[in-house]
Image (cartoon, grey):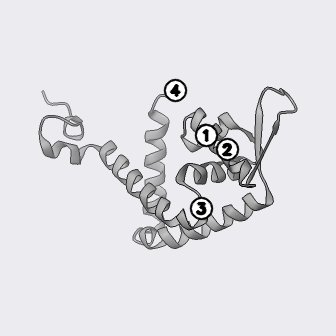
Amino acid sequence: MINRLDQFLPNNEPKSLQNFPFFWISQVNGKYSQLIEKSIKKLGIDNTRRKIILSTNALGEASITEIANLSTIKLTTATKAVYRLVEDGFIEVFSSEHDERISMVKLTESGKQLVEQINTISIVTLTGILNAFDEDELNNLNKQLKKIFDLMPSN
């Protein structure tokens, strides 16, 4: 008996990949990353630093580990990028009040201005794409993607 999900899993058939949801998630993420990378190049930052800036903004004050997790970046990569952002004046690093071994991160005023610039570029870059969907479709898409995320095991 054929499993009802077999059609959505990759197999030896070349076209099977196009039915595999993770193929499309990967394709969309790759294309999105290229598009954003090209758009933010004029700000003098790369996609890794953009993710860290936006994650730091979302979290307020946070450890480098928390920022790496939210940014979906390896801790060593995040740490290097954080210290490059410190050199650029966008982020401050300080010891946690509760545990001095933990490096905490927060945005500087320049970092907050960079967030505004990144968001403006993102709006200009992505509005045309998002306008192809109505509000219900976007809410449903977010709901489905979150469901996939929640079902996946954590590291």
Q: CA distance from mark 4 to mark 3?
A: 32 Å
What number is the disc on residue 78? 1
Mark 2 Cα-neighbour bin, 10 Å: few <14, some 14–19, many ≥20: many
Closer to the camera: disc 3 or disc 2?
3
Q: Disc 3 designates what residue?
A: 44
Give the residue furthest to the right: 97
Closer to the camera: disc 4 or disc 1?
1
Tell me whether circle 1 and circle 2 mark residues in contact (CB < 8 Å). Answer: yes
At horizontal 69% and vertical 50% (from top left) the residue drawn is 85
Q: Disc 2 designates what residue?
A: 82
Closer to the camera: disc 4 or disc 3?
3
Tell me whether circle 4 and circle 1 mark residues in contact (CB < 8 Å). Answer: no
- Closer to the chain start, of discs 3 and 2, is 3
Disc 3 residue type (three-letter): Gly
Q: Position of residue 21 (x, y in %)?
A: 31, 45
Q: CA distance from mark 1 to mark 3?
A: 17 Å
- Closer to the chain start, of discs 4 and 3, is 3
| Direction from residue 39 to residue 58 in the image, left or right | right
Disc 1 residue type (three-letter): Ala
At horizontal 57% and vertical 38% (from top left) the residue drawn is 77
Q: Position of residue 20 (x, y in %)?
A: 26, 43
- Closer to the chain start, of discs 2 and 4, is 2
Q: Disc 4 designates what residue?
A: 155
**Residue 120 vertical placement versus 14 (above, below):** below
Q: Position of residue 124 (x, y in %)?
A: 52, 73
Mark 4 Cα-neighbour bin, 10 Å: few <14, some 14–19, many ≥20: few
Q: Name the secondary structure under disc 1.
A: helix
